[in-house]
Every structure is written in structure tokens, then in C-alpha cells.
Amino acid sequence: MVLTAVFLNYIAHNEAVHPNKPFSTFPKQIGEWKGIEQRFDDEIYEVLGVDDSYLATYRAPDGRLVQLYIGFYQSQREGDLIHSPKNCMPGGGWNIVSSSIEELDVSDTDHNPIKTIRFKLSKGIHEQAVLYWYQSRGRIISSEYLQKIYLVIDSITRHRTDGSFVRLIAPIKNGDEEKTLIYIKEFARLIFPILTEYIPS
């Protein structure tokens, strides 16, 4: 009983992991892309349970748009788990047309290349392309299942359950998903080094 109590106290250790910088300082100008910060409705933030987050739509000079969302969780021990788009998007009325793993070249970093999750979404006549990944405790994870496995392992071995979720969305124009994906990946390559300045490794 004593050993059990010690173990439970060990894994319930109070975490104090914060972003390296507050996401309110995330740059609004990234290369040629200019961002306008946004907010979800308060009810959405209550459901998400994030400790810090960033939502902005970036526009290139030629009119291309990418929405960036970053959600940071200081701890996932108390039920505030990172929400998967596989559940949230259908709840928002979007249908997942296709899902696959997409490799992203982030050269000159310690994580090259990375694997991301790719979606194609539809709602009526509207279509969107999505890339997202989990960036948690020094890992880039492209699987909800692995994310949960590493969460358990790190809670025991590292006393950490902090984690981040990064999502990029862009509207598909003229049905050209591949063209849209090209510039999402271009934008993702630009933000990745910045993300490592904010998200704890």
C-alpha cells in the first residue's frame, strides 16, 4: 500500500510546463505572409481546455490563405486532452473526404522530415485541405494512438503530459487540392522553426 501511494504521488506530480513564450507574441508577419489574429467562440475554448493558444489567418500577396491554429496544454492529467480533428471536424459539419500521412520537409531542423496528417474536407460546395500534427515533449507525432501512448510513457518517466497541437487549413479553389497542399506545406516550412521557439522540447 505504501508503494502504491508513493507511485500515485509520483505520477500525480504537479506540472509547471509553460510555453517558452506566450503565443500572444507569435509573429503576424512570416515571410511574405501577413496574419490577422482571430478567436473562436468562448464556448469552444471551454471545450478545448487549452492553457494557451493562437489562431490567425495568414494571407500571401497573391491572395492565398492559410489558417493556423496552435493549442498548448500545460497538463493532460485532469481530462483536458488534445482534441482530434477526426472528432471535431465532423462535429462542425465538415465531412472527411480523405485522410493520409503527408511528409513535410523541414530542413535545417532536428526533425527533418516530419510526418503530418492530411485531410480533405467538404461541406456543401466548400472544400478545405488540412495538415496537422502533435508537437509534444520534443516529438512530432502524426498518430492519435501514438500520441496517447507517449502521453502515458512520459507521464511516468518524465513527469510531463504537456503537449501541443498544430493545424493548418486552406480553402481548395477550383477543385485543385494538390495546388492548395503545395502552398500549405510552403507555409508550414516557414512556421516550423518558429514553433520550436514557443513549444517546449
Image: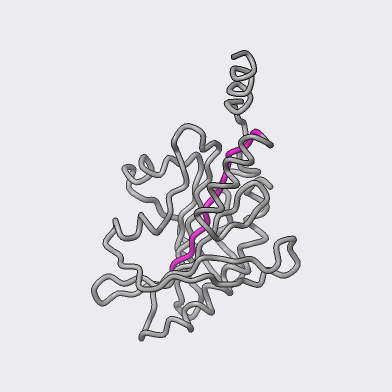
Q: Is residue 160 magenta?
A: yes
Give the image location of residue 98, x and y in percent: 40, 73
At 49% from the left and 60% from the top, the residue drawn is 167
Give the image location of residue 162, x and y in percent: 58, 41
Compared with 102, 89 (above or below) is: above
Q: Furthest residue to the top? A: 2
Give the image location of residue 193, x and y in percent: 67, 60
At 47% from the left and 32% from the top, the residue drawn is 78
Occupied quadrant, residue 196: bottom right
At 41% from the left and 85% from the top, the residue drawn is 176
Give the image location of residue 87, x and y in percent: 36, 55
Compared with 124, 162 (above or below) is: above
Give the left or right position of residue 57, taking residue 22 as reference: left
Front position in the image: 155 or 167: 155
Q: Is residue 71 magenta?
A: no
Compared with 124, 145 (above or below) is: above
In what quadrant of the picture does the N terminus appear? top right
Front position in the image: 111 or 182: 111
Compared with 39, 122 (above or below) is: below
Highlighted range, magenta: 159-170
Q: For residue 61, say whether it is visible.
A: yes
Front position in the image: 150 or 21: 150
Q: Main secondary structure of the magenta part?
A: strand
Q: For residue 24, say whether it is visible.
A: no
